[in-house]
Each structure stands twice: as C-alpha cells, then as structure tokens.
Image (spheres, rainbow, N blue to C red):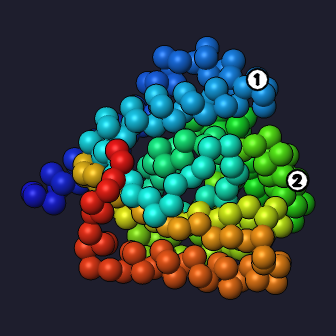
Amino acid sequence: MRKALFNFWGILYHIWFYILVAVPILIALPFLILTTLSERTYRQFFWLARNIWAPFILYGMGCPPRISYEEKLLKHESYMLVANHTSMLDIMLMLRVSKNPFVFVGKKELVNIPLFGFFYKRVCIMVDREDSRSRMAVYRRAQKRLNQGLSICIFPEGGVPDESVVLDSFKEGAFRMSIAHQIRLVPITFLDNKKRLPFTWTKGRPGPLRVKVHSFIDTSVLEESDKRILSQQVRQIFLQDLEEPGHAQIPQHIRT
C-alpha cells in the first residue's frame, strides 16, 4: 500500500511538472513567438526563458537551485558549458546557472514534445547523432552563434543514461568543439536532479537542486588530438562529485 501511494505521488509529481512547463509558455506565447522570429532577438527569448520560465518551474516543483561557483562567468564572454544529464530539470537548471545567453545543442527527438518542441527547434542547435552530415552542420551553426557573442551548452553523455548508471560515457563533440573554437570549457555538476525528477514516472520528490560550477578549462593551448584526454578529465571531475558520500556537502557560498 505504501509503495502504491509513493508511485501515485510520483505520477502526480511528473504531471505537475508538465503543467508547469506549459502554463508560462501559453501565457507568454505572443512574446515567445516574437522573440523566436529572428536570431537577432534570441537574447530577449533567453531572458524570458531564464528569468520567468525556468524559475516558475523549479520553484513550482519545490526544487530551489543552490549554485556554487569556483569561478564566475564573465559578461560578454563565450563558453562551452557541459554538465551531466539525468533529468528534464537539467534544462531549467542550466538556464539559472548562466546569465550569459547560450544555445543548447541537443538531440532532434525533443522536437516531438508538445509545445516545448515547437520552440526547441526554433532556438536550439539540433543534431541527429546517426547522421554525419548533421554532426558537421552543428559545428557551422555553433560557430555562427559564437560569432554573435553567445555560449554553447552540451550534455556530453548524449542522452539520459539508465538510472542505475552514475555517469555514462561521454561523446567527444563538446570537447572537440571547445578546442576548435578556442573557448573556455565550464564543467558543471548537477548533484540532485536525478532523485528530484528522474525519468521514471513513479519516482521524484521536492528538494533543493545543488550545482557545482567548477573552475574553467582553457582550451586555447590544446589541439584536436587532446579531445579525449579533455573528455576524460571532465568526466573525472563529475565522478568525483557524484560518487562522494552524500553527493558532497552544500557549499557555504551559494546563489539561489
């Protein structure tokens, strides 16, 4: 009986999440459409997503962000943002991490999510990982966005791993791209997203979302042949956080 109640709660919690995703989109629909008509208005779209949509969802789910920074993101500088991927909350939480406008690089399948997918395909760089031409096109589109002063965000696991997997193997695209475009790479560990809103519909609960933004990695001195070592270095940073008992302590200096 107790297990059935927990499962029922998990299902309601997930339904509530999708309601929170949809409500601000429907309310702000005219503004969202206007700000996605052109790449020139992307910064306005990003502001709406970061300051209205994301906090509405995170706080509505009872999941306030707790973000610690080993190094601050500088205004008007482009970065390669990389984080572990465990939950749909990752998207909203990443928006809260960076005030600098950035563009997600993500799999094309997310286009199929009702309402969310409509804007996703208009503002994100989509990639079909089974198509080599699609992967190459990502580099060209990323360079264009970087030239516009934006940052890029990639989840290097490439998809959400099985819940039993602490951290999946990494695709090398983010690291190759960071080296090719000579932008600093920012490792970001999401410590709590999997237990707050996993992809299993019968699981999930409110609570703070801790984030560790690690010191940036300078890629200007690296060559493409270094991409695997860079990938392994970042993966080890994430594993050290995720495998620590209790997923590390909550830092003293945090930002909500």
Residue 175 image-quadrant placement: bottom right
Mark 2 and mark 1: span between their CA atoms?
Answer: 20 Å
Left or right: 41 as drawn, with respect to 201: right
The amino acid marked with disc number 2 is Arg
Q: Regarding mark 2 in the picture, which secondary structure is present there?
A: helix
Q: Regarding mark 1 in the picture, which secondary structure is present there?
A: loop
The amino acid marked with disc number 1 is Leu
Give the image location of residue 102, x and y in percent: 65, 45
Q: Is residue 151 above or below residue 237?
A: above
Give the image location of residue 10, x and y in percent: 27, 50
Left or right: 60 as drawn, with respect to 74: left
Residue at 36% x, 80% y is 243
Residue at 55% x, 78% y is 235
Q: Residues within 10 Å of mark 2 (few under 14, many from 20)?
A: few
Residue at 47% x, 44% y is 96
Give the image location of residue 83, x and y in percent: 54, 63
Q: Residues within 10 Å of mark 1 (few under 14, many from 20)?
A: few
Residue 223 image-quadrant placement: bottom right
Q: Is residue 207 above or below residue 49?
A: below
Give the image location of residue 133, x and y in percent: 90, 60
Q: Which mark is residue 37?
A: 1
Pick whichever, 11 or 158, lies toward us.
158
Left or right: 129 as drawn, with respect to 231: right
Provide the residue designation for mark 2: 140
Q: Is residue 128 above or below residue 226?
A: above
Residue 169 visible in this rendered orientation of the protein: no
Residue 46 image-quadrant placement: top right
Q: Are the residues flagged by discs 2 and 1 in contact, CB closer than 8 Å? A: no
Between discs 2 and 1, the one toward the N terminus: 1
